[in-house]
Amino acid sequence: MHQQLIMNIIDLFTPQSKVEFYTKIFDTLDLSDFPDEVNTSVSGPDGFSRHALFRAFMVMKCEKFSEITQLQEYLFNNQIIAHTCGFDITRKLPSYWTYRRFIKNTAHKWFSAVMQSQVKALVSLGFIDGSFVSLDSTSIEANTSKNNSKSFDKSRFDKSILPKSDKDCKLGVRTASNAYNEKNYEFYWGYKNHILVDAITGLPIAEVTTTANITDGEIAIPLLKDTHSWLPLNETFLIADKGYDIRDIYNFVHDELRGHCFIPLNQRGSKKNRKTLICGNPICDAGFAMQKDGRQYLKGYIKQKFRCPFHSSKDDSACPCNHPKYFNGAKRRGCIKYISTGSDYRASINRDSKYFKSIYSLRTESERYNSRWKNLNTDKASVRNMASVENLNTVGHICLLALAVAAAKSKKIDCMKSLRNFKISA
C-alpha cells in the first residue's frame, strides 16, 4: 500500500509520455547475455542490478547528458524513470562512484553483444541487410586541459608528454573545421570511433573505439572481418573516403567478401601540376611530349619510363631550354620521367563514371549518422580512461539502435532517426 502511494506521488513529477518512451526503449534491449550480478555484503549495503545500471546509462544518452552527475541528479528528481530502469526506489539510488565503477569495470564485450542483438533485430525487420555499407571515423576529445585552444602551453601537443588526467589517450590529427585555422588540419588528444553504417538506412552496424593515433586504414579490415563473422557481408559494396584508399582493403573486399569498393584515390606523394597529354605522355620543361622508353612490371603496378625526345641526338645543344638534367646519365642524353600505373583491382575502378559517383554519394549517410551520434554529447569525453570511453560510445550507438527498433515496432518509421519526435509521439 505504501509503495503504491509512493508510485502515485512520483508520477506527478514526470510526464507519462516520457515513462512510455523509456518503457518502449527498454523493451527493445536483449540483456539475456549481460551479467546481472548484484554484489551483497555482510557488513555493507547490497549492490545494484547491472541491468538497471545499464538502463540508467541509456537514459544518460537519451537525455544527452555529458556528465554522470547529471544522470544521478535526473534519476533522483524523476524516480519513476529510476523505477523503470529497475532500481528499488524505496532505498537509496546509486552514487556517482557506483555509476563510474560500472562503466569502467564492465567488460566491453557485454555492451557489444547488446549492440549486435539490436542490429540483428533490425535485420529481421528488414531495415539492415549489409548490401551497401559505409565506413568512417569520428574524433573524440579527451577530458584534458591540453585540448583547450586557449592554453599557452607550447608543449601541449608533444606526444612524448602524456596528459596527467587521461594517460590512455593519444595524440591524433583531424581535419580542421573552422575558418580561423589557416591549416587544413589540427592536432588533438583523445580517441576515435570507427563506425560501419548501413548506407541505405543510415543505421549503425558495428563500431570500435581506438586511440587517436590509429589511422582509419588500420582498423578497416579487422572491423569488417569481425562484422562478417556474425552478419554476412557477402557481395557488399563498401563506401569510404580516401583515408581508406589502401590496397589491402581493396583486396580483402574483392577477394574475401566478393564485393566492390567505392573509394576515391588518395594522391599521396604524387607530383602536383604535372603536365601530360591526353594519351598519358608527360610534357617536359621545354614543352615537348616525352617518349616511352621501356617499362618495369612490379607487384601491383607498372612503372613506365619516359625520356627526352632528343635523346638520340648527337647535338649537345638540342634541348631548347638547356635543361641541367639533359646531360644526366652515362650517355648524357636527355631528361627521364617515370609514371606508375596500377595493374590490380584498385587501379581498375573507373572513378569518373556516373555509376561510381552515384554509389559514392551514399557516403553522406555516414556523415549524417556521425552527426546524430555526436548530438548525444559523445564528441567530448567526460570520463578519463579508455574503458569508460569505449563503453559509453557503444551505449550511444545502442541508444540510437533502440530508437530505430522501437519506432519500427510502433509503426512510426518517420521517428526512427529522431529521439525528440519519438519522445513526443510515445
Image: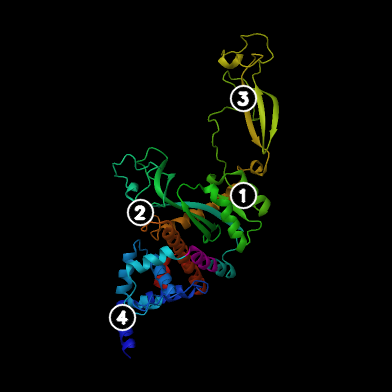
The disc placed on residue 10 is 4
The disc placed on residue 400 is none
Which residues lie in the magenta part?
A: 107-117
Q: Earlier in the sequence, mark 4 or mark 1?
A: 4
Considering the whole magenta stretch, tell me its main secondary structure: helix
Q: Quadrant of residue 37?
A: bottom left
Q: Is residue 318 magenta?
A: no
* Location of residue 391 with respect to 49 vertically, above or below: above
Residue closer to the observer: 144 or 357: 144
Q: Are marks 3 and 1 in contact (CB under 8 Å)?
A: no
Residue type for callout 1: Cys
Residue at the spot of label 2: 143
Residue closer to the observer: 8 or 151: 151
Q: Earlier in the sequence, mark 4 or mark 2?
A: 4
Q: Are marks 3 and 4 in contact (CB under 8 Å)?
A: no
Q: Residues within 10 Å of mark 3 (few under 14, many from 20)?
A: some
Residue that extends furthest to the bottom in the rendered view of this protein: 1
Residue type for callout 3: Lys
Q: Residues within 10 Å of mark 4 (few under 14, many from 20)?
A: some
Residue type for callout 4: Ile
Task: Determine whether the residue tagged by mark 4 lies in a helix, strand or loop.
Answer: helix
